[in-house]
């Protein structure tokens, strides 16, 4: 009984005091509690909810997103899943950390530390857009913590992403540090609104969240630093191109795309009526797809 209760007690200790910057970090979401967790290297802002003994789902955002892009999906899942939604290093209210332009392996180590601090059981990990890279690196490095990898609207560097990615990926990756942030300064709403181009993101409030988050000093360039790190991600992935030790799914909006193309052997699940931002366009359908993946994993585990 002590072993079963220990992770819950640790989680309670971490989450009883909300973050001091909860307003800047985004409004509360029903069923989720916001907190800051020290991973041992960097402090990450995270929202957590759901039954402590339920299957764990970790939802990772991309750019220009924060944890709140997942709120519709999280509210749906939180009734019967342990839902963990962090701001990745340097995004939202998470610290940027001491390493400039951190690669996916560094972010994966952050997530491994977060998982350990929260005492999480092996999780179904969903990485959207630029969240796909650390999700893949985490599954590669720590299959004991990731039971199933789900990529959504993001690909794997070194395994075909470079040929398939939209032009902005290479443009962001090759721009000198600070240049794009300087060009965007004071025009964040205009630039990010045009970049996203999805009315659902504006209607949900996620565009407001993005403008607030990436207008903060240093945060836009921190996001560009993740693009600058993509060549290092690619080099690492080419060194170990073999199959993952965990099952994987490409969860695509509307039609198979970059996730399916760069994740050979993965199952492919399409959310009809959704585009790139499937968690915003069709949150309940996206949650249903994730719930089905968790259910299949649970059925396999109990055979």
Image: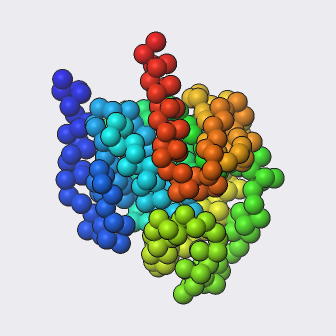
Give left or right: position of 156 versus 204.
Answer: right
Percent x, y of residue 247: 58, 29
Residue farthest toward the right in the current orientation of the protein:
163
Percent x, y of residue 54: 33, 33
- Residue 101 visible, this angle: no
Give left or right: position of 36 versus 105.
Answer: left
Residue farthest toward the bottom in the current orientation of the protein:
186
The image quarter in which residue 263 lies: top right
The image quarter in which residue 222 lies: bottom right
Which residue is pictured at 44% across the width and 44% down the height? 58
Above or below, comparing residue 208 to residue 245 in the picture? below
Q: Quadrant of the N terminus?
A: top left
Above or below, comparing residue 146 to residue 282 in the picture? above
Front residue of this view, candidates 236 and 154:
154
Which residue is pictured at 31% across the width and 61% down the height? 28
Residue farthest toward the top in the current orientation of the protein:
303
Count numbered badges in the picture.
Answer: 0
Percent x, y of residue 152: 60, 47
- Residue 269 visible, this angle: yes
Front residue of this view, candidates 100 and 132:
132
Give left or right: position of 267 versus 61.
Answer: right
Give left or right: position of 294 versus 172.
Answer: left
Residue farthest toward the front in the current orientation of the protein:
273
Above or below, comparing residue 120 to residue 212 in the picture? above
Front residue of this view, candidates 80 and 96:
80
Which residue is pictured at 26% across the width and 68% down the height? 20
Q: How is the image coloured?
A: rainbow
Percent x, y of residue 27: 33, 66
Which residue is pictured at 48% across the width and 59% down the height? 69
Front residue of this view, candidates 138 and 81:
81
């Amino acid at each position: 009984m002590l072993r079963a209760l220990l992770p819950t007690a640790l989680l309670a200790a971490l989450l009883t005091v909300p973050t001091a910057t909860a307003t800047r970090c985004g409004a509360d979401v029903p069923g989720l509690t916001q907190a800051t967790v020290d991973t041992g290297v960097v402090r990450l802002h995270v929202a957590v909810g759901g039954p402590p003994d339920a299957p764990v789902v970790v939802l990772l955002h991309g750019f220009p997103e924060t944890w709140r892009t997942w709120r519709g999906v999280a509210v749906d899942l939180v009734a019967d899943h342990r839902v963990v939604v962090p701001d990745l290093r340097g995004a939202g209210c998470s610290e940027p950390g001491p390493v400039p332009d951190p690669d996916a392996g560094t972010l994966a180590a952050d997530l491994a530390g977060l998982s350990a601090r929260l005492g999480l059981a092996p999780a179904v990990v969903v990485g959207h857009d630029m969240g796909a890279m650390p999700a893949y690196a985490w599954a590669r490095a720590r299959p004991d913590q990731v039971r199933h990898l789900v990529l959504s609207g993001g690909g794997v560097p070194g395994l075909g992403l470079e040929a398939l990615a939209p032009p902005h990926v290479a443009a962001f990756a090759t721009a000198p540090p600070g240049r794009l942030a300087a060009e965007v300064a004071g025009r964040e709403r205009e630039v990010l609104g045009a970049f996203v181009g999805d009315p659902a993101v504006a209607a949900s409030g996620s565009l407001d969240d993005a403008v607030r988050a990436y207008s903060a000093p240093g945060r836009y360039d921190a996001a560009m630093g993740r693009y600058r790190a993509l060549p290092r991600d690619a080099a690492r992935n080419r060194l170990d191109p073999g199959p993952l030790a965990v099952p994987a799914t490409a969860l695509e909006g509307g039609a198979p795309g970059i996730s399916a193309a760069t994740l050979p052997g993965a199952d492919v699940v399409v959310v009809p009526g959704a585009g790139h931002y499937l968690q915003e366009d069709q949150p309940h359908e996206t949650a249903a797809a994730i719930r089905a993946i968790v259910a299949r994993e649970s059925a396999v585990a109990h055979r």
